[in-house]
Amino acid sequence: MTRVLIVDDDPMVCTAIEIYLEREGFEVTVADGGEAGLRALEVSRFDLMLVDIFMPHMRGFESIRIFHERAPTIPLVAMSGYAFANLDSPAPDFLRMALELGATRCLRKPFTPGALLAVVNESLAEARSRFSGIAQSN
């Protein structure tokens, strides 16, 4: 069974993702922040991580960087629902920044269950093909 770690401080988001992925046959672990996510990563093996960019305490960017350092082979999907108050001002592209820190894909909140499943499946397929390429070259 494919194991997914969700790291998000919003319990409603976690519950929605958890319910949908479990219905699709995934085994899901929820962590309510970066520290809890790192603890989960230390005691369990995961096939994919979904990490919110904006969380209190350990910020999502810091979490993404550390998760990627500790588990570089696990695909990491960065999520963000950040909205800027002033759309006329130049805004940093937080999802692009997450990709530069090691995320394999990004999801902008709110997203549909179909978009979630597509990103999860694409990330897993890409990781499997990368792993099989490494195994065949050895």
Image: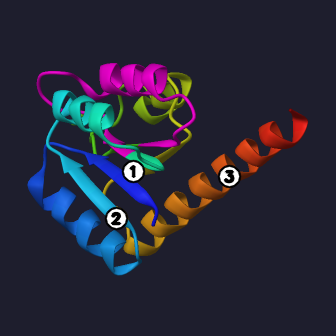
Q: Residues within 10 Å of mark 2 (few under 14, many from 20)?
A: some
> Label 2 is placed on what type of residue?
Glu
Q: Is residue 66 left or right of residue 37?
A: right
Badge 3 amino acid: Arg
Q: Is residue 90 visible?
A: no
Q: CA distance from mark 1 to mark 2?
A: 23 Å
Q: Which mark is in front, 1 or 2?
A: 2
Label 2 sits on residue = 27
Whether residue 13 is visible here, answered yes or no, is yes
Front: mark 1 or 3:
3
* Helix, strand or loop status at disc 1: strand
Foreground residue, 96 or 5?
5
From the image, tell me which residue sits under label 1. 108
For the record, the magenta segment spans 50-77
Residue 12 sits in which quadrant?
bottom left
Figure check: 8 above or below 96: below
Q: Identify the residue under disc 3.
A: 128
Q: CA distance from mark 3 to mark 2?
A: 18 Å
Separation of residues labelled 1 and 3 (CA atoms): 24 Å
The answer to whether 123 appears left or right of 78 in the picture is right
Q: Residue at x 32, y 35 (%)?
A: 41
- Local crowd at mark 3 within 10 Å, few (<14), some, or many (≥20)? some
**Chain-order first, disc 3 or disc 2:** 2
Q: Earlier in the sequence, mark 1 or mark 3?
A: 1
User: On the rendered image, what quadrant is the C terminus found in?
Assistant: top right
Q: Earlier in the sequence, mark 1 or mark 2?
A: 2
Instruction: Residue at 71%, 43% (x, y): give it.
Output: 131
Q: Is residue 71 magenta?
A: yes
